[in-house]
């Protein structure tokens, strides 16, 4: 340490004398810097380098380990029901913990329907927002609006649930559901009794939650469409909408599908907000206003109370199914989005 | 001629109409999307701020029916669990990111790791919760703060690794070459030159991951469980802010609901601050200046 402090001072004090004299004491005893001192203090670096490399590799591989660990844990702890019910588990609709009879169909149905409702609401809106932000929005607004939609993605699920219970559900029950019952009652999807909580409320909350994901990815894909495409269509005399439809959306469609699937992946696994507004009932009913349950929400609501091993094993098996499904859905989505955005920069030039 | 002219006018009208309709639809959907966000924030600020007081930060929960309770134990519990998670998740994540950007660039392995990290990001948190339940809670036969920390730590790894990688890729090669040219060993160059340069970005990435797990409730349900009393022990069930919000939101008492709103506000402020910071760093380009 003392050497390092002395070293830079030496030339200063030597300024008065001739510069050549000043250099001599500096060059001989003192290492030039901390780095050099360090270099001289240690031996060969190859050991340290390869150790470092291996440690980093190990940490990178830990990501595989985590996925493997989750899979193994889920399979091991759901052995009981896997062996007992087999694949019938997913087609049986009886959920009777008292008699140890388990069928997950109502939850599979609930997950699929609530996600479908969410997609039906969210996709047109998300694409609309993306179109507005990339093609129409004044530059001054763009930053703020995209920041707002990103904020939506950062709100915790439980806060959405809280808002859902105290704001959204009363709003649906009081104003929106009656209209839907009147207009769409003939489809059988919107019939009384209406408690506010139920499948539709869950779908709406899910839609709000997956909107930012879909719209920000769609925006990314649309920005990746080269400007020449837009210019070519405009040069043919197209209106702005025709330009967007033919020049942008058509080119970006695979990526948009990818982002929708990614949103679906999130909707399938979303837990807290759904568990709080869906009403938790292991039944299948045609009406969207009836209480229901999803795969994730049943785990959240019942796992802590599941006293006997079969019950717990059944819930873990639902988790396993959810794990496999979300992995497949996410893989598909990532591959689609990657396929589009990866080649993008090359095409722009 | 005349018919053609007619149809062309109709056509032009139609095109004019669709163009404007599409514009208004896009504007309308943007408004529809922004509306719930504004509503959520207004409700949070309005309902949360009115019930936020000193008791909230200093008092324990009181039995239902009494007022003046707080969430002090939940705040401490969240801090304990999140600290544990960061201790586990951030070093592993950063190291993984370093591998991806410095050693595995362009290799098949790193592509697969990157892909798996993205997939892992999409795995529902409740699934991770039951996996860790099986791994830690079931064998030890007790819910614990430690198990909660492990779940959240695992959830941080992919996010931290991916942002670290992205930030380190932005560091210009000349800086690495300069370090190596001085004879600095590679590991030292990576740690104190490349990582150091990318630090602002890496830190914001960590904060993003932190903000994400700070609001997680589902994985804590069967790991940390929740606790109405003071506890900082790692082997005991512990309360966390999102868990407490969940319990209070579903409870039947108005006082609980008020506290749930206040808790949400605190949580949101924490998250919004970190997200804004992330956005500031990534868009204003603390890193871009390095080029």
Image: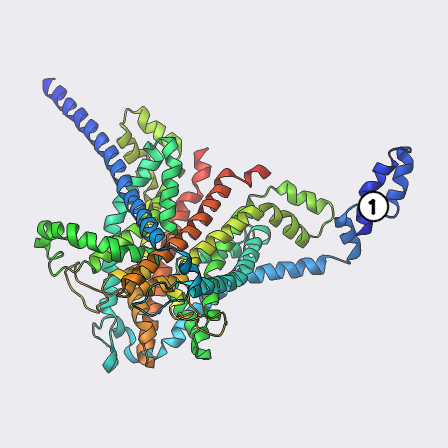
- Which quarter shows the C terminus of chain B? top right
Nearer to us in this view, B67 or B251: B67
Lateral position of residue A92 relative to residue A209, left or right: left
Q: Where does the image place residue B142, in percent across and percent down from the top left?
A: 44, 77
At horizontal 80% and vertical 42% (from top left) the residue drawn is A8
**Residue linked to disc 1:** A6
Question: In which chain is the residue bearing label 1?
Answer: A
Q: Is residue A270 visible?
A: no
Q: Is residue A234 left or right of residue A342?
A: left
Find residue A302 and report its image quarter: bottom left
Is B204 displayed left or right of B54 in the figure?
right
Residue A51, image x and y in percent? 66, 61
Could you say where residue A294 lies in the image, as x and y percent from the top left? 27, 64
- Which quadrant of the figure contains the N terminus of chain B? top left
Residue B198 visible somewhere in the drawing: yes
- Give neighbour class at mark 1: few <14, some 14-19, many 20+ (Cα, 10 Å): few
Q: Is residue B28 above or below residue B98?
A: above
Identify which residue, B192 or B213, lies in the foreground. B213
Q: Residue at x 31, y 65 (%)?
A: A296
- Residue at image position (11%, 53%) is A181
Please identify the quarter of the rendering in which residue A289 is found. bottom left
Residue B207: x percent and y percent?
49, 52
State the residue in front, A162 or A66.
Answer: A162
Which residue lies most toward the top here?
A: B1
Residue occupying the point 20% across, 72% down: A93
Total numbered labels placed on residues in the image? 1
Q: What secondary structure is found at the residue carrying circle 1?
A: helix
């Amino acid at each position: 340490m003392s050497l390092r402090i002395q070293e830079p001072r030496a030339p200063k004090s030597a300024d008065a004398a001739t510069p050549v004299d000043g250099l001599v004491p500096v060059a001989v005893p003192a290492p030039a810097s901390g780095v050099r001192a360090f270099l001289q203090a240690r031996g060969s670096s190859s050991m340290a380098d390869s150790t470092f490399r291996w440690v980093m590799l190990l940490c990178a591989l830990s990501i595989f380990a985590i996925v493997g660990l989750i899979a193994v844990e889920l399979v091991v702890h759901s052995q009981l029901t896997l062996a007992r019910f087999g694949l019938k588990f997913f087609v049986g609709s009886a959920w009777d913990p008292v008699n140890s009879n388990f069928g997950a169909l109502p939850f599979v149905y609930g997950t699929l329907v609530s996600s479908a409702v969410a997609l039906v609401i969210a996709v047109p809106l998300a694409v609309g927002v993306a179109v507005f932000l990339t093609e129409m929005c004044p530059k001054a607004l763009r930053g703020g609006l995209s920041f707002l939609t990103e904020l939506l993605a950062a709100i915790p699920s439980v806060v959405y649930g809280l808002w859902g219970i105290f704001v959204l559900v009363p709003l649906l029950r009081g104003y929106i559901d009656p209209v839907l019952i009147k207009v769409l009652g003939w489809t059988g999807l919107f019939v009384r009794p209406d408690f506010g909580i139920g499948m539709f409320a869950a779908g709406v909350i899910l839609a709000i939650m997956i909107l930012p994901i879909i719209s920000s990815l769609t925006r990314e894909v649309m920005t990746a469409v080269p400007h020449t495409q837009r210019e070519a269509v405009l040069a043919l005399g197209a209106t702005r909408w025709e330009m967007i439809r033919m020049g942008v959306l058509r080119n970006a469609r695979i990526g948009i599908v990818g982002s929708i699937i990614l949103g679906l992946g999130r909707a399938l696994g979303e837990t807290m907000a759904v568990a709080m507004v869906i009403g938790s009932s292991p039944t299948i009913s045609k009406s969207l206003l009836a209480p229901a349950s999803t795969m994730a929400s049943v785990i959240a609501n019942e796992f802590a109370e599941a006293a006997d091993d079969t019950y717990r094993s059944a819930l873990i098996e639902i988790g396993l199914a959810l794990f496999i499904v979300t992995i497949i859905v996410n893989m598909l989505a990532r591959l689609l989005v990657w396929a589009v955005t990866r080649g993008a920069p090359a095409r722009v030039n | 001629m005349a018919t053609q002219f007619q149809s062309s006018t109709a056509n032009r009208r139609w095109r004019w109409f669709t163009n404007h309709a599409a514009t208004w639809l896009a504007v309308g959907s943007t408004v529809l999307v922004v509306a719930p966000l504004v509503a959520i924030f207004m409700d949070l600020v309005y309902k949360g701020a009115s019930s936020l007081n000193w008791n909230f930060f200093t008092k324990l929960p009181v039995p239902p029916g009494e007022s003046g309770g707080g969430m002090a134990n939940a705040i401490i519990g969240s801090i304990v669990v999140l600290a544990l998670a960061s201790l586990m998740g951030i070093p592993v994540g950063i190291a993984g990111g370093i591998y991806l950007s410095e050693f595995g660039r362009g290799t098949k392995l790193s592509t697969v790791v990157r892909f798996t990290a993205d997939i892992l990001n999409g795995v529902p948190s409740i699934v991770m919760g039951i996996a860790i339940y099986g791994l830690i809670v079931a064998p030890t036969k007790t819910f614990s703060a430690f198990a909660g920390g492990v779940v959240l730590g695992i959830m941080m790894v992919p996010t931290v690794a991916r942002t670290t990688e992205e930030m380190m890729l932005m560091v210009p090669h000349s800086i690495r070459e300069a370090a190596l040219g001085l004879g600095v060993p590679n590991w030292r160059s990576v740690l104190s030159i490349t990582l150091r340069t990318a630090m602002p970005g890496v830190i914001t990435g960590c904060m993003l991951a932190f903000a994400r797990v700070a609001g997680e409730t589902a994985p804590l349900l069967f790991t940390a469980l929740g606790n109405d009393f003071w506890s900082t022990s790692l082997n005991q069930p512990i309360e966390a802010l999102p868990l407490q919000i969940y319990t209070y939101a579903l409870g039947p008492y108005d006082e609980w609901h008020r506290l749930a709103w206040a808790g949400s506000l605190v949580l949101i402020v924490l998250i919004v601050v970190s997200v804004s910071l992330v956005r500031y760093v990534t868009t204003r380009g603390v890193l871009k200046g390095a080029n």
